[in-house]
Each structure stands twice: as structure tokens, then as C-alpha cells.
Image (spheres, rainbow, N blue to C red):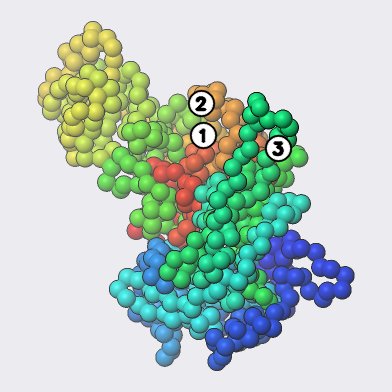
Amino acid sequence: MIEPLIMQSTLAMLSQLPPVVDNANTSPLLQVSSQKNQLSSSILPSVPRLDQLPPVANNSSTRRQAQLLSQVSPQVIRQGSQIALNGRVFRVAWKQWKLGKSVRTGISDVGLTQTVGMELLSTRDFTRQPVQWFSYPPSTPLVLPSKLSGSYRYLDVTDFARIAGWQLQVQGDALRIYSVPARVENIHLETQPWGSRIIVDLDRPTPWQVRDLRTEGAIAFEAIADPSLIARFNAPPVVEQRQEIEDTAPVPVVPPIAQPVIRLDNAQNQTLLRVSIPEGKRLQVFSVPNPYRLVLDLRSDSLVEKEILWAPGIRWRQQYVNLGESRFPVVWLEVNPRTSGVSFRPIWSNPATQLGTAPLIQTAQLWQASAAINAGFFNRKNQLPLGAIRRDGRWFSGPILNRGAIAWNNSGQFKFGRLSLQETFIASTGVRLPVLFLNSAYVQPGIARYTPEWGPTYTPLTDNEVLIFVQNNQITAQMPGGIAGQMTFPIPTNGYLLTLRTNSTNVVADSLSSLSIGTPVRIDRSTTPADFARYPHILGAGPLLLQNRQIVLDAKGEQFSDSFTQQSAIRSCIGITPAGTLIIATIHGRVGGRGPSLTETAQLIQQLGAIDALNLDGGSSTGLYLGGQLLDRSPDTAARVHNALGIFRPSLP
């Protein structure tokens, strides 16, 4: 028998299939078709079909092999970052290693989901991963051995590929997978109480991929569709009938039906099914055996609940969380910071400068993070940060507006609070000038300071700035900044650059008269609260949600706009439990409605067990990354971001 937890997500999906008629023994989607079985057997006569694999018992050798795999250090012989599936290339990590005399092939687990449609089921054992792929877990669970290596978790697909009839071939950085194309036998559209269901009949299991583009879903599968079937789902749209003045009989006005529109294309042994997604619905796709089918559900509650121990100290969870009459889909990671080898660091799109944005997937892979969540705010126009980023004791961007922040040390201790940084520029002549901002794109009249952590150069953000260059604690130059954005100035490698932004020429003249070239200077610095300065790593965002088990939301106090404060939107947030476990969560739109408000976000992460919590940048920036892919959304719908919190195991780059 397989553990109930492992079957949870698949049972949830199978329970949503059409009801069984009184005289039937099985659901229509699970009934065996002898004609299809004969066809599948003729293609692969020497190996068992996936639905014929024997159940995996608790004491079976298959499970022991999975545990053994994680305890040895096999010799890695090849690895790469691309999979070419029948010639179509995907960015997915893979690795080959020797285990005894056998060469084993592993593909990153989340990447396997994205490229072949394999669903990862719940598990409490990170060394073995139950999966569903044209299989029925209660009777024939498929369990793949897993191997943690670097920032990925690889599933050993060596035996699975043989059973599925795949050919594996390495060519440079790419693992090439060749599969026999299936045949699309029919497509059905059904109306259900909760939405719409599309059923694709196949003659054999085949890889498939899903792209969710918000208003349209695109499902590509390695299969050939008959031209008549393609023509059937590419009929010209019905022209809307209009009421003309001379019409003798009125045209009835019928409200639009939220029915999906299906389009089918076929090219190079691949079928592409496009389906419109009605407002308030989301796309859920899964596979079933006997006969082989892909099932596409358009429903408001499309999240598949699961709990996966991904690695020691890292647990991936996703489920609906109730709040009043609303149900919110929440995807989160629970990370134990005291686990050996687990560490946290701020990461951003370009390690050499604070200028730039990138997809979260790209940034996480650049820094070799195992997991990541988008973090602080930034200016989308100039692609510069708007909040605290401190790593290894160095301020890459300073805090602004006394907004919420999270700080931590290398021992796994965390602090949440509202943070401000005070700096004073002190000259030997007695001049003391407050520095309002450090390495920041937040622009206000006054003095800002830019260090090499900002990047090699500084480009004025406002017109007519006055620049003061300091090297080895001594003023070395003064010059005008000119028109904003037109010139760049080098930041001294062993010093910094001050910029004076003001509309008052008198203020500038008074300041510069006491700051001649050669004047010795120094910087005095402190934080509020003072103990934030003890933490080498800090990320700022806001507003602060929870502190000491209480909701302390004060968006106006942190100088967020009214529109930001009042909106309901997709959210990212981070919190910590009484036991010290970090909760890194994304919350999407409630079933049939919009995302949570800030107050609802605080209440939801409180329900997850947090006693301290911080809101992060959200909306299109929201993204939760693990093992090579986003967990909470399609990358097609995620915006580029500036910075993130990276989770590393077992070592930092």
C-alpha cells in the first residue's frame, strides 16, 4: 500500500471525474479499452505498459533502491542544462552518473513536470518521488528514486524511460529524448457544474507541456491528429447577428456563454491545442490511463493540493486556505534555517551592478539558488532598487521611508521590523551633512551616497546634481552632473560619490564652500532599530504584516500610496514560526475572485503559522522558484524583477 499522503493530490483529481453509472465498475475515464491496449502492446511488445506496472509495496526493493541512491556519492559523468524532446529544446537541468556498472540518467523534478507532464505527488521522503503519468496511483504508483545535487533534485528516469519507450541520447549540453508520437483519436468538450472539461483521447502515453497565458491555455503534446479532427476544431467563428432597423422580427439577445473556444494545430508530430480561458477560471491538466487520456479542466479551483519534502529542511506545500467565505490558493516553502547546509542570501539580476531586471528563474539560476522568492520593490522604468539590500555586511541598496524589512545572520536567526538608516557626512572643517539615501533610486532633495556596491558608475537621476568624489576618506573632485540620464561618472573603487540634489542654488553654494578638494571626511552610520546593524543580510519591502503574533499593518505609516494600500492583488510574503521555520509564500486570487488585500495577506500567513511576517513586492512580480522552475504560476505571466531572496543548499556560489 502507498501512504495516503502520497495519493492525496491524485485522488483529489480523480474524485472530480464524471460520476460512475450504477451498472459500471469503474469511472468512464478509467475503463479499459481492449482496442487501445492492443495497439499500445503492439508498439512496445517487450516492456509492460505504465498502467500494468505492479504496485510498489512499502518493503519492496524499488523503495529500498531509492533510499540507497541518496546515501552514495556516484561518479557524475555528464551533465547539462537543456533537454531536446523530439527536437524541441527546453531549459531543464539533467545529469548522468555511474552507479556500479550502470549509467543512470536524472532530470530535475520540476523540469520533468514542465517538459513531459509528469505530476509530482505528495511525499515525506525526499529520496523517492511518487509521480503520476498516465497511471493510477492507488493501484499502480510510480515511484522514482531522487538525487540531490547542487541546486537541483534529480529524478532517476533510466528505467521509466525504457518502460515509456523513450530513447535517451547525450549531445553536448543537451539530453535528447525521442518518443514515439501518439495518435489523437478524439476530443470531447463537456460542461460540468464547476466549469468545462476537455478530454483528449490518445492511443498511448505521450509527453505534454502546458502554457497558461491567463486568457488562453496552450497544451502541446507529442501526438498526431487526423486532419478531419483539426478541421473540426478550426471552424470559422460564428458571426454575431445584429439587429437592423428593417428586421421584422427581433433578434433575441442572449447573454454570452462562458464556453471555451478550442483551436487545434498539427506540425512535426506534435499537436497544439489552444483553449480560451473564461474569466474567473484557471487551467488544470492531468493524465489518466485505461484508456489513455489528457484531461483539461477549466475551473475556478484549479490548484492541486500537495506536500513534498523536497530536501532536508525544505518542504514544498500548496493548498487552499479559507478566510471567511473566501478560499485562497497558497503555494509556499517551509525552510528550516538550522538544517545543515541551508543558507539564505539576497540575490539580484546583475551581480556587477544594481541596474537591471530579469525573470526570477534566470536570476535564481545565475546565483545557483535551489529556491527563491521575489523580494523588494524597484523602479520598472529605470530598473533600479527601491529598498534595503544588504549582503555579507555590505549595503547594495539602502532602506527607504522606514519600511518593513527582514534581517538575518548565518546562524539562522531572523528579525522583522521597520528599518531606517541614518548616515552623516562629516568633514574636518566641522561641516556635518545628513545623507538621506544610500545606493538608492528613491529621489528626494538632499544628499545621496553611492558606493562601488551600486556598480562601477553612477548616472544622475535628476537634472543639475552636484557630484562630490571621495577617495581614501578625502575629497578628490567636484563637478556638475548635467542633465539626468545623459552622462555616467565612475564611482571611486576605494571610496564613494556624493550627489547633492536641490532646487536651491544657495544651499549648494553654502555646502560646497566648505568642501574643497583635499578635505578629509568620514561617514557616521547607525540604524533604527539599532540591533538591525548586527545582521549581515537584510532585504526591505513592506509593509510589515505581523510582529510578535499581532497584525501591525500600517501601510500609510510606511508611506505607501492609497491605491497600493487599498488594492487586492497577488501577493508574496515571508514569515517565521515560533519554532524558527521560515515560511516563504505566494498567494493568488481567491476562488472566483481577486487576490488578497494587505489585511487578508496578514491573516493568511498568520494561519500558516507565522508570528512575524513581511509583505514583499507582488502582482506580476510574484513568483516562487524551486529546482529550476516557478511553482505558483506560468513563467509566461511573471514579470521581470530586480531582486529576490535566494535559498541555497548545500553551498553558496
Left or right, residue 515 beside residue 363: left
The secondary element bearing badge 2 is classed as: loop
- Residues at discs 1 and 2 in contact (Cβ within 8 Å): yes
Q: Residue 223: horizontal and vertical position, in percent? A: 51, 71
Tell me whether the residue at label 1 lies in contact with that at label 3, contact meaning CB atoms closer than 8 angstroms: no
Is residue 419 in view from this perspective?
yes
Q: Give the CA distance from mark 1 to mark 2.
A: 9 Å
263 in relation to 14, above or below: above
What residue would you read off at disc 2? Answer: 560
Report x, y in % for residue 357: 36, 43
Give, as a three-letter code, the residue at label 2.
Answer: Phe
Which dot marks residue 542? 1
* Nearer to the camera, 102 or 506: 102
Q: Residues within 10 Å of mark 2 (few under 14, many from 20)?
A: some
Residue plotted at (57% across, 65% down): 229
Q: Give the left or right position of residue 418, taking residue 589 as reference.
A: left
Where is residue 572, by image quadrant?
top right
Q: Where does residue 514 sit, x and y in percent of width and height? A: 18, 15
Q: Tell which of 173 and 308 is nearer to you.
A: 173
- The residue depicted at 19 percent of the width and 40 percent of the height is 493
